[in-house]
């Protein structure tokens, strides 16, 4: 069902699903799940921290110790 919405990176565990939303609105995902009869007990949108983004772009951390 998540793949039908165009979501990518959908690893499955017994109780939890994770997916990369890209440009799909979170409320659209929840509505589609409920409409298909899939119970939604919780939903969270996670985003990388600024440091994670920086490391991804540069491959290097920054030294704040002086």
Image (tube, grey):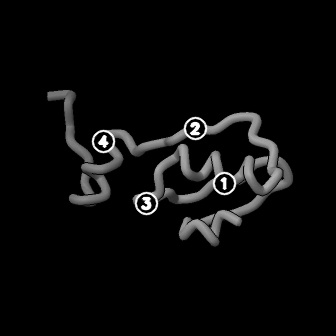
What is the C-alpha distance between the residues marked 1 and 2? Answer: 16 Å
Q: Report the residue marked by disc 2.
A: 44
Q: Quadrant of the C terminus?
A: top left
Give above or below for 36 relative to 41: below
Name the residue furthest right.
14
- Label 4: state its secondary structure: helix
Mark 2 or 4, nearer chain start: 2
Mark 3 or 4, nearer chain start: 3
What is the C-alpha distance between the residues marked 4 and 1? Answer: 33 Å
Q: Quadrant of the N terminus?
A: bottom right
What is the C-alpha distance between the residues marked 2 and 4? Answer: 20 Å
Q: Report the residue marked by disc 3.
A: 22
Q: Is residue 64 left or right of residue 37?
A: left
Give how far across and how far down residue 17 sits, in percent.
Answer: 71, 53
Q: Residue at x 65, y 63 (%)?
A: 2
Q: Residue at x 63, y 71 (%)?
A: 4
Mark 4 or 1, nearer chain start: 1
Name the residue furthest top.
65
Mark 3 or 2, nearer chain start: 3
Question: Given this view, does label 3 or label 1 mark the residue nearer the observer?
Answer: 1
Mark 3 or 1, nearer chain start: 3
Q: Residue at x 81, y 43 (%)?
A: 39
Question: Given this view, does label 2 or label 4 mark the residue nearer the observer?
Answer: 2
Name the residue furthest left.
66
Mark 1 or 2, nearer chain start: 1
Question: Which circle marks residue 32 in the picture?
Answer: 1
Q: Report the residue marked by disc 4.
A: 51
Q: Residues within 10 Å of mark 1 (few under 14, many from 20)?
A: some
Q: Residues within 10 Å of mark 4 (few under 14, many from 20)?
A: few
- Label 2: state its secondary structure: loop
């Amino acid at each position: 069902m998540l793949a039908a919405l165009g979501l990518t990176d959908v690893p499955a565990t017994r109780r939890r699903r994770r997916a990369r939303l890209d440009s799909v609105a979170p409320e659209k995902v929840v509505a589609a799940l409920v409409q298909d009869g899939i119970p939604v007990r919780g939903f969270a949108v996670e985003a990388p921290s600024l440091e994670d983004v920086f490391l991804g772009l540069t491959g290097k951390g920054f030294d704040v110790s002086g």
